[in-house]
């Protein structure tokens, strides 16, 4: 049975399903729930990759501070504002400013940029700046930021610790931060990677259930993409921590997770992510949108910077300009009979 009261056990059994006929029922149900709850509009969020500096050491991520093979950059305020202007000129309703956890991004500096965008452009502002202190989150919210994204990456606390070495003398709890964000009045988004080494089917089913438990306004999921420049891939850690019941980081698994997320969170904004588009450049975006997703995050970062924001290799749209992505996505969305959203595209 497929309904919103789907249990963790039922989610897990769908994750294990391989019968194409049965899976077709899942895609159809997710698409119907998407249509009934958030409609046919696909909301576009212009992604600005503001800085690739990061103090953290997440073992799967190319931005981790130990990666010396990366040229670091931080955009300046005028460059960021120009990207926001370009996003607004394409009719996008939101900009997402994303960076590594970069304390070179000072609280007041970012607050001023948020305020400048909110005062001058018809845009919602989403931030994705990592585990910043509560005061910073509060400051940016007061400056006008509307939304914040912080993926919890896995609901398995042991696996979380294994792949997220803490900063010295500091422990953080992403669920506590997500709770704070909600209290501050941010629309709050989270998500996980699919097929990260150590992830079992049971863990992934719990992750999906957790999206609903925390009533996430936005949920972003994408396949784990091995990055040879990370500790996880460099010294065999991936094999060492792989679970007996390891989930594979496949395209099919990604669609299952998108569809199941739509069933448990009918009203959430769910993107068809860049990581999915990376493993199927031809039709990943469209298939994500047809199996539960209702958002796309076109990159508006200048090409000179986006090529340096290398979380994982082979990222989709690496050498395309913001203008090219805009045209490309408009055509893709039209090809599946959907429309482009207007306005902020907030959660209803
Ligand atoms: N493959 C796929 N996604 C990744 N992320 C980080 N590293 C990788 C990788 N190697 C995701 C994380 C993070 C988001 C910004 O990118 O889930 O929250
Ligand atoms: Fe960037 Fe298609 S979305 S080229």
Image: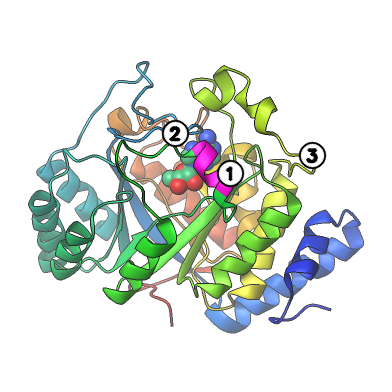
**Disc 3 + disc 2, Cβ < 8 Å:** no
Disc 3 target residue = 244
Dot in front, 3 or 2: 3
Q: Distance between the residues labelled 1 and 3?
A: 14 Å
User: Sequence-wise, which precedes: disc 1 or disc 2?
Assistant: 1
Precedes in sequence: disc 1 or disc 3: 1
156 left or right, relative to 269: right
Looking at the rendered structure, which numbered label has been put on residue 311?
Answer: 2
Report the quarter where the N terminus lies.
Answer: bottom right
Q: Residue 198 carries which label?
A: none
* Residue 308: quadrant of the picture: top left
Q: Check mark 2 vs ligand 1: CB closer than 8 Å? yes or no.
A: yes
Quadrant housing residue 33: bottom right
* Residue at x 67% of width, y 55% of height: 204
Residue 337 showing in the rendered view: no
Q: Earlier in the sequence, mark 3 or mark 2?
A: 3
Q: Does the magenta stretch include residue 36?
A: no
What is the C-alpha distance between the residues marked 1 and 2? 20 Å
Location of mark 1 (residue): 159
* Viewer-side residue, 238 vs 217: 238
Nearer the observer, 40 or 54: 54
The number of callouts visible is 3
**Location of residue 105 in the rendering, given as x and y in whole percent from the top left corner:** 17, 43
Distance between the Cα atoms at labels 3 and 2?
A: 27 Å
């Amino acid at each position: 049975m497929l309904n919103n009261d789907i249990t963790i056990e039922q989610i897990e059994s769908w994750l294990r399903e391989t019968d194409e006929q049965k899976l077709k029922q899942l895609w159809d149900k997710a698409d119907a729930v998407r249509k009934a709850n958030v409609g046919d509009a696909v909301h576009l969020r212009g992604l600005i990759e503001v800085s690739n500096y990061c103090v953290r050491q997440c073992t799967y991520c190319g931005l981790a501070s130990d990666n010396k093979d990366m040229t670091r950059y931080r955009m300046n305020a005028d460059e960021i504002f120009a990207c926001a202007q370009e996003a607004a000129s394409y009719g996008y309703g939101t900009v997402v400013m994303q960076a590594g956890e970069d304390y070179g991004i000072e609280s007041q500096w970012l607050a001023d940029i948020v305020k400048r965008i909110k005062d001058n452009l018809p845009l919602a502002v989403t931030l994705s700046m990592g585990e910043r202190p509560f005061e910073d989150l509060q400051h940016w919210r007061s400056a006008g930021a509307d939304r914040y994204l912080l993926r919890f990456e896995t609901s398995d606390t042991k696996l979380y610790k294994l792949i997220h070495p803490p900063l010295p003398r500091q422990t953080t709890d992403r669920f506590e931060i997500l709770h704070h964000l909600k209290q501050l009045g941010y629309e709050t988004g989270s998500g996980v990677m699919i097929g990260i080494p150590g992830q079992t089917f049971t863990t992934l089913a719990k992750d999906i259930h957790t999206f609903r438990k925390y009533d996430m306004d936005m949920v972003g999921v994408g396949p784990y993409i091995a990055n040879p420049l990370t500790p996880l891939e460099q010294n065999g850690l991936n094999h060492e921590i792989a679970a007996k019941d390891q989930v594979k980081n496949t395209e099919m698994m990604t669609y299952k997770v998108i569809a199941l997320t739509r069933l448990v969170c009918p009203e959430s904004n769910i993107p068809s992510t860049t990581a999915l588009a990376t493993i199927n450049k031809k039709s990943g975006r469209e298939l994500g949108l047809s199996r539960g997703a209702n958002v796309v995050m076109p990159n508006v970062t200048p090409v000179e910077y986006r090529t340096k924001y290398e979380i994982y290799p082979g990222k989709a749209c690496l050498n395309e300009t913001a203008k090219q992505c805009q045209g490309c996505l408009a055509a893709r969305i039209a090809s599946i009979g959907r429309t482009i959203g207007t306005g902020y595209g907030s959660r209803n």
